Image (tube, rainbow, N blue to C red):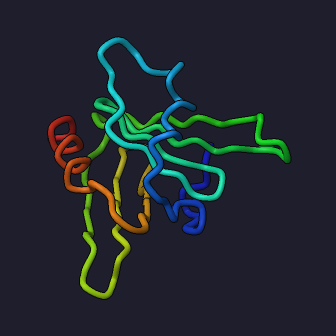
Amino acid sequence: MIDFENKSLFKLKQNAGFAEKVTPLLIDGEEVLDSFKSMRDGVVFTSKRIIAVNVQGITGSKKDFTSLPYKNIIAYSVETTGTLDIDSELELYFSELGKVRFEFSGKCRLMDIAHYIARYAL
Protein backbone atom coordinates (compact mmCIF):
# COMPACT_ATOMS: atom_id res chain seq x y z
CA MET A 1 0.00 0.00 0.00
CA ILE A 2 1.14 3.55 -0.67
CA ASP A 3 2.61 5.51 2.23
CA PHE A 4 0.16 8.43 2.31
CA GLU A 5 2.20 10.21 4.96
CA ASN A 6 5.05 10.81 2.48
CA LYS A 7 4.13 14.25 1.11
CA SER A 8 6.70 14.22 -1.69
CA LEU A 9 4.95 11.22 -3.22
CA PHE A 10 1.86 13.19 -4.11
CA LYS A 11 2.98 16.45 -5.76
CA LEU A 12 0.72 15.71 -8.70
CA LYS A 13 0.30 17.23 -12.14
CA GLN A 14 -2.59 16.54 -14.45
CA ASN A 15 -1.78 13.72 -16.87
CA ALA A 16 -4.59 12.21 -18.94
CA GLY A 17 -2.46 9.29 -20.14
CA PHE A 18 -1.89 7.97 -16.62
CA ALA A 19 -5.50 6.70 -16.51
CA GLU A 20 -4.52 3.83 -18.82
CA LYS A 21 -2.75 2.13 -15.90
CA VAL A 22 -6.06 1.54 -14.08
CA THR A 23 -8.34 0.66 -17.00
CA PRO A 24 -8.31 -3.09 -16.17
CA LEU A 25 -9.55 -2.31 -12.64
CA LEU A 26 -12.64 -0.34 -13.64
CA ILE A 27 -16.06 -1.89 -13.12
CA ASP A 28 -19.13 -1.58 -15.35
CA GLY A 29 -20.37 2.00 -15.39
CA GLU A 30 -17.25 3.41 -13.75
CA GLU A 31 -15.72 6.35 -15.61
CA VAL A 32 -12.38 8.13 -15.25
CA LEU A 33 -12.89 11.75 -14.15
CA ASP A 34 -9.27 12.88 -14.10
CA SER A 35 -5.79 11.50 -13.62
CA PHE A 36 -2.60 12.92 -12.15
CA LYS A 37 1.02 11.86 -12.07
CA SER A 38 4.07 12.64 -9.97
CA MET A 39 7.51 11.38 -11.02
CA ARG A 40 6.39 7.75 -11.37
CA ASP A 41 3.36 7.34 -9.15
CA GLY A 42 -0.08 8.72 -9.75
CA VAL A 43 -3.73 8.99 -8.81
CA VAL A 44 -6.83 8.41 -10.89
CA PHE A 45 -10.21 9.78 -9.81
CA THR A 46 -13.15 7.80 -11.14
CA SER A 47 -16.88 8.21 -10.72
CA LYS A 48 -16.78 5.71 -7.81
CA ARG A 49 -13.35 5.86 -6.16
CA ILE A 50 -9.78 7.06 -6.09
CA ILE A 51 -7.13 4.66 -7.36
CA ALA A 52 -3.58 5.42 -6.22
CA VAL A 53 -0.82 3.77 -8.23
CA ASN A 54 2.61 3.16 -6.71
CA VAL A 55 5.11 2.27 -9.43
CA GLN A 56 7.86 0.08 -7.97
CA GLY A 57 11.22 -1.32 -8.97
CA ILE A 58 13.93 -0.09 -11.29
CA THR A 59 12.00 -0.82 -14.48
CA GLY A 60 8.62 0.29 -13.13
CA SER A 61 6.94 -2.92 -14.25
CA LYS A 62 5.72 -3.71 -10.73
CA LYS A 63 2.76 -1.62 -9.56
CA ASP A 64 0.74 -1.41 -6.36
CA PHE A 65 -2.89 -0.26 -6.78
CA THR A 66 -4.80 1.14 -3.79
CA SER A 67 -8.55 1.59 -4.19
CA LEU A 68 -10.16 4.25 -2.01
CA PRO A 69 -13.97 4.20 -2.40
CA TYR A 70 -15.76 7.52 -1.96
CA LYS A 71 -18.38 5.80 0.20
CA ASN A 72 -15.74 5.32 2.96
CA ILE A 73 -14.93 9.04 3.22
CA ILE A 74 -16.18 10.54 6.47
CA ALA A 75 -14.84 14.10 5.92
CA TYR A 76 -12.79 16.02 3.37
CA SER A 77 -11.13 19.37 2.81
CA VAL A 78 -10.31 21.21 -0.43
CA GLU A 79 -7.75 24.02 -0.66
CA THR A 80 -7.83 25.83 -3.98
CA THR A 81 -5.05 27.81 -5.65
CA GLY A 82 -4.47 31.47 -4.87
CA THR A 83 -2.80 34.40 -6.56
CA LEU A 84 0.72 33.54 -5.41
CA ASP A 85 0.16 29.95 -4.29
CA ILE A 86 -0.43 27.84 -7.41
CA ASP A 87 -0.72 24.54 -5.54
CA SER A 88 -3.99 23.04 -4.34
CA GLU A 89 -4.65 20.29 -1.81
CA LEU A 90 -7.22 17.63 -1.12
CA GLU A 91 -7.42 15.99 2.31
CA LEU A 92 -9.67 13.01 2.78
CA TYR A 93 -10.52 11.22 6.01
CA PHE A 94 -11.43 7.57 5.63
CA SER A 95 -12.98 5.34 8.25
CA GLU A 96 -10.36 2.80 9.36
CA LEU A 97 -7.56 4.25 7.16
CA GLY A 98 -7.29 7.80 8.48
CA LYS A 99 -6.13 10.87 6.57
CA VAL A 100 -5.02 10.80 2.95
CA ARG A 101 -3.55 13.97 1.46
CA PHE A 102 -2.93 14.86 -2.17
CA GLU A 103 -1.07 17.97 -3.38
CA PHE A 104 -1.61 19.24 -6.91
CA SER A 105 0.64 21.51 -8.97
CA GLY A 106 -0.78 23.78 -11.64
CA LYS A 107 -4.28 23.68 -13.01
CA CYS A 108 -6.67 20.93 -12.05
CA ARG A 109 -10.42 20.49 -11.78
CA LEU A 110 -10.34 19.99 -8.02
CA MET A 111 -13.81 21.43 -7.45
CA ASP A 112 -15.27 18.94 -9.96
CA ILE A 113 -13.59 16.13 -8.05
CA ALA A 114 -14.91 17.56 -4.76
CA HIS A 115 -18.41 17.47 -6.27
CA TYR A 116 -18.11 13.74 -6.96
CA ILE A 117 -16.75 13.12 -3.48
CA ALA A 118 -19.70 15.01 -1.99
CA ARG A 119 -22.16 13.06 -4.13
CA TYR A 120 -20.91 9.71 -2.85
CA ALA A 121 -19.75 10.62 0.66
CA LEU A 122 -22.72 12.67 1.87
In this view, the residue in front, 117 or 58, is 58
Residue beneath the point at 37% across and 40% down: 45
Residue 52: horizontal and vertical position, in percent?
52, 42
User: Is residue 48 rendered to the left or right of residue 52?
Assistant: left
Q: Residue furthest bottom?
A: 84
Position of residue 95 relative to residue 108, above or below, is above
Q: Which quarter of the rendering shows the N terminus?
A: top right
The tally of labels here is: 0
In this view, the residue in front, 102 or 42, is 42
Residue 68: horizontal and vertical position, in percent?
42, 38
Position of residue 68 relative to residue 79, above or below, is above
Residue beneath the point at 33% across and 63% down: 107
Residue 122: horizontal and vertical position, in percent?
14, 41
Q: Residue furthest right?
A: 58
Q: Quadrant of residue 110?
A: bottom left
Residue 59: horizontal and vertical position, in percent?
83, 42
Position of residue 82 relative to residue 10, above or below, is below
Position of residue 18 relative to residue 21, above or below, is below
Residue beneath the point at 35% across and 60% down: 91
User: Is residue 119 rendered to the left or right of residue 32?
Assistant: left
User: Is residue 54 rendered to the left or right of residue 29?
Assistant: right
Residue beneath the point at 26% across and 47% down: 113
